[in-house]
Image (cartoon, helix red, strand yellow):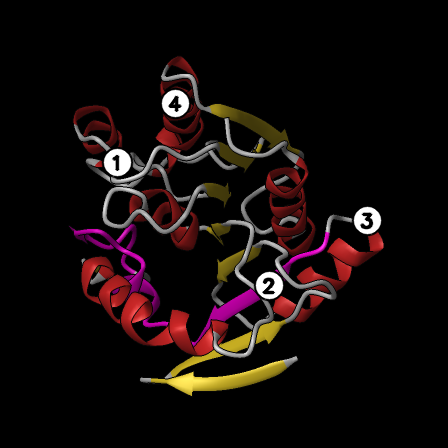
Amino acid sequence: MSSFTIQGKKVDVLPASEPGSPIVYLHMFGREGDRVFQELQNEKSPDLTLVAISKLDWNHDMAPWECPPLSRMDQPCTGGADEYLEMFIREILPEAEKDIEGEPAWRGISGYSLAGLFAVYSIYRTDLFSRVATMSGSLWFPGIKEYIFSHDPMIRPDHMYFSLGDKESKSRNSYLKTTQDNTAEIQAFYADQGIDSIFVLNPGNHYAGPVKRMAAGIDWILRREGTE
């Protein structure tokens, strides 16, 4: 594993064993990238380079637009996803790939919680990622479902994975209680477009087994056949 820091973001590159393997970018709140990579190896997943990005300005970098705090204890989202994505493409991605042998077979993007929302949003702002995995993605985010239904992505992904804990929508919060319905409707929307996709319900709440959930989503997009 090699690591570097750009504009305060910590990037861990866990390389594939074979040249030309796919590369998956995983945005996360903590630094669980090595644990996710180990879980993938334990499951004998196909070879990949995993690039794990952490130390994000979470409520800014991962949010497509502004959103008020969910509760008095939370911080508002300040809508910096476009700004972050531009920096990611210009600085992080080239640095992460400079020592990788061979051209990657494909690039994927993945994330948990707000980073799962960001993974989906990214395909509307760049054509770099042909596979998407969003685990417990914040698809309750106000306006995201309407945005997806009314905009064309810059790339039509070959494969999209969605997962959620089966207790995540059991909330009194007016935003959070829409999570499961929104996720199901968004996945069905992509499926209706002919995009290979799946929605998996896991037992537990938002915080149950995130490493295993992240690994499961990445494993799914790795095991799909090539481009349609």
* Residue at the spot of label 2: 50
Question: Which is in the foreground here, disc 3 or disc 1?
Answer: 1
Amino acid bearing label 1: Pro
Task: Report the residue that reaches farthest toward the front.
Answer: 102
* Residue at the spot of label 1: 153
* Residue at the spot of label 3: 43
Chain-order first, disc 4 or disc 3: 3
Q: Residue at x 60, y 29 (%)?
A: 201
Please state if 54 lies on the left or on the right of 12 as rendered. left
Gap in Å between the C-alphas at discs 1 and 2?
24 Å
Gap in Å between the C-alphas at discs 4 and 2?
25 Å
SS of the residue under disc 1: loop
Q: Position of residue 81 (x, y in %)?
A: 24, 59
Amino acid bearing label 2: Leu
Question: Which is in the foreground here, disc 4 or disc 1?
Answer: 1
Please give the range of residues in magenta: 47-72
Chain-order first, disc 4 or disc 2: 2
